[in-house]
Image (tube, helix red, strand yellow):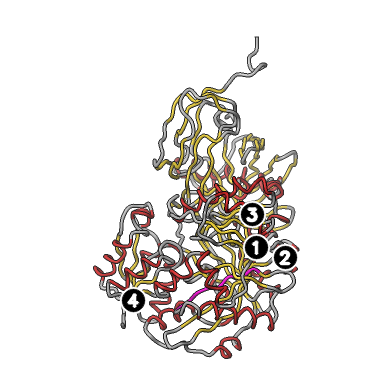
Amino acid sequence: MLFDKVLIANRGEIAVRIIRTCQRMGYRTVAVFSEADRLAPHVALADEAVCIGAAPAQESYLSIDKLIGAAKASGAGAIHPGYGFLSERAAFAQAVQDAGLVFIGPDPQAIEAMGNKSASKIRMLAAGVPCVPGYQGDDQSDTTLVAEAQKVGLPVMVKAAAGGGGRGMRLVTEAADLPVSIQSARSEAANAFGDGQLLIEKAVLQARHVEIQVFGDRHGTVLHIGERDCSVQRRNQKVVEEAPSPAVDEALRARMGAAAVAAARAVNYVGAGTVEFMLAQDGSFYFLEMNTRLQVEHPVTEIVYGLDLVEWQLRVAQGEALPLSQEAVLARRSGWAIEVRLCTEDPADNFLPQTGPVLAWHAPHGGAMRSDHGLRQGATVSPYYDSMQAKLIASGGTREEARRTLLHMLEDTVLLGVGSNRDYLSHIIAHPVFASGDFSTGFVAEHLSPQAFAASRAPSALHSALAAVLLYRSAALSLQAQAGLDAELLEWQSSSPAQVPLLLLCGTERLRTSVTALGQGHYRVQAQGEALELHIDAMEAPTVRFSHDGLQGKAHFALDGEHLHLAHSGLTLCYTDATLAPAAKDAPGSDGRLLAPMDGKILKVLVQPGQAIAKGQTLAVLEAMKMEFAISSGVDSTVTALSCQVGQQVKARQLLISLAPTATPGDSQP
């Protein structure tokens, strides 16, 4: 069936990326959006757009009927699912085909065959594809799973059969931990995928995660487009991806590619797909799963092989044959590409998802730099969807060239107003072990502990001094504008320069600073026991250029009331001018109120009014950006009232539970 209009059943950066290729090829495009995404970039970029419901994904992006209805109403002849959401739901692909539309992806039967990890593993064993020893049976009792795990031999991976992304996955090294790991993995899998089925696999430690891009058409051709290395992972979720893999030579590439093609042929695969393998140190490799869709990390393959994989998807969906042979594809490989996932999360606070306004946004692009994103300045990052907002990709003739370019790209990327992992990504790319290329999936756990990263977040004297000057100068500029004063009168004083004290809050730190305006953009600052002199050369948000100790530098900043977001020298921090603010108590619940740490939905409430609780005890569970977070008190308390209930959508800092902190000896003074 031919089509000339494509509906993209997705949002954010992948919708933008698909729309651009569609439009380059002459297709008209239809975007879909929830109420939360009405002003999103993918909506503005498409030729047409259809609102499909409220902000929660279940009421919009996960509604098959609404998506098909939008396609029919707009006259779209095909639907591209992107990745995530419904992209790997066989029922969605079948519904699209039943509606007389083209699904730009594999047939429902292939999705179904590879969608369940247990069933796909059985199929791969039959096809001769190497698989990790383990258990993938129908008996899902705790007793059987524990017994099978012990039979395989610890350590083992307990994994959700129906999903991916690290959810419903636990590494177990001690037999005593098996029961609780199985129960928690089953609960997380059921909540994330609607299916609590688990499988057990032998844990291959110090391995690499290497995946093969495959492509099939309806003319019997299946080929592979090389490998990607996705070994830098946190909690089994990919953080950095690159092509080619530093651990793969030509012979291994041929072997892994042949196994991936065999896996795809076993299910008569059509379109773009990825076969994921675990690569052991001795060069042996084992099938993990097949992703029956376009991958997040597909740009690195596109860059290294000089291809547009979305274009190939569209051509195959139209019934065309793949344009290149296997030999021709492999002959195109040139250079290196590395990608990082920019997410709105706080690495210094257990990667807590962040929501809020995008006060400033810029990502370098062009030449050796590519940015795929769905952000815009002035937008608000909501709690309803995944925390990944952009992909930053750099290339070069060698891996080291690509790495240096990506590090530079990260330093010049500006995302202010809402917290992100930009600085964390820079730490990874700059790390000498990553630079060496010799690492495994244990890289993050071994080399980037949360404690070490949190320690690196301490502001330098220069960083905090610049923050003080920007807050002081911004207040002066605001006063000048309100009073209608001439620019020459900015910071004018009738007497000698006065030292103005400022108390800045930065995380848990209280920084006492002072600023003395010396005139003409020159300032003397006391910060962290040091005296510094700064000169503001140019200041136009979000960029400030300044001089210090004979060196000129630049930083990026954004103001939000009394809050200043400042990025300088690879460190992005939020300062609050608390000069006139009352002191706040630190421990959550110490003031009798337990507040939501972010926007989200209440999944569980585990206490009742009148119940005594201990410090650190989990009182409720909040879901945000597809992840679960425990809400606990920082003090021994008694619950006095509940202000939330299961299923309720709450806002950041909304009151959830009222507490009466328990007095301890020594609390009161005579």
What residue is disc 4 on? 102
Label 2 neighbour load within 10 Å: few <14, some 14-19, many 20+: some
Range of the magenta residues?
271-278
Q: Is residue 202 magenta?
A: no
Q: Secondary structure at mark 4?
A: strand
Residue, x 32% and y 70% (percent of image)?
A: 96
18 vs 592, left or right, is left
Tag 1: amino acid: Val
What residue is disc 1 on? 232
What residue is disc 2 on? 439
N-terminal-most mark, 1 or 4: 4
Instruction: State whether residue 623 appears in this view.
Output: yes
Q: Nearer the viewer, mark 1 or mark 4?
A: 4
Choose between 597 and 138: the one closer to the eye: 138
Q: Secondary structure at mark 1?
A: strand
Q: Secondary structure at mark 2?
A: loop
Choose between 562 and 361: the one closer to the eye: 361
Q: Please count the marks in the image.
A: 4
Q: Indicate the position of residue 40 as horizontal and vertical percent values.
A: 39, 60
Magenta segment, principal secondary structure? strand
Report the Cα–Cα distance between label 3 and label 1. Answer: 16 Å
Q: Give the vertical position of 476 relative to 281 (above or below).
A: above
What residue is disc 3 on? 171
Instruction: State whether residue 545 appears in this view.
Output: no
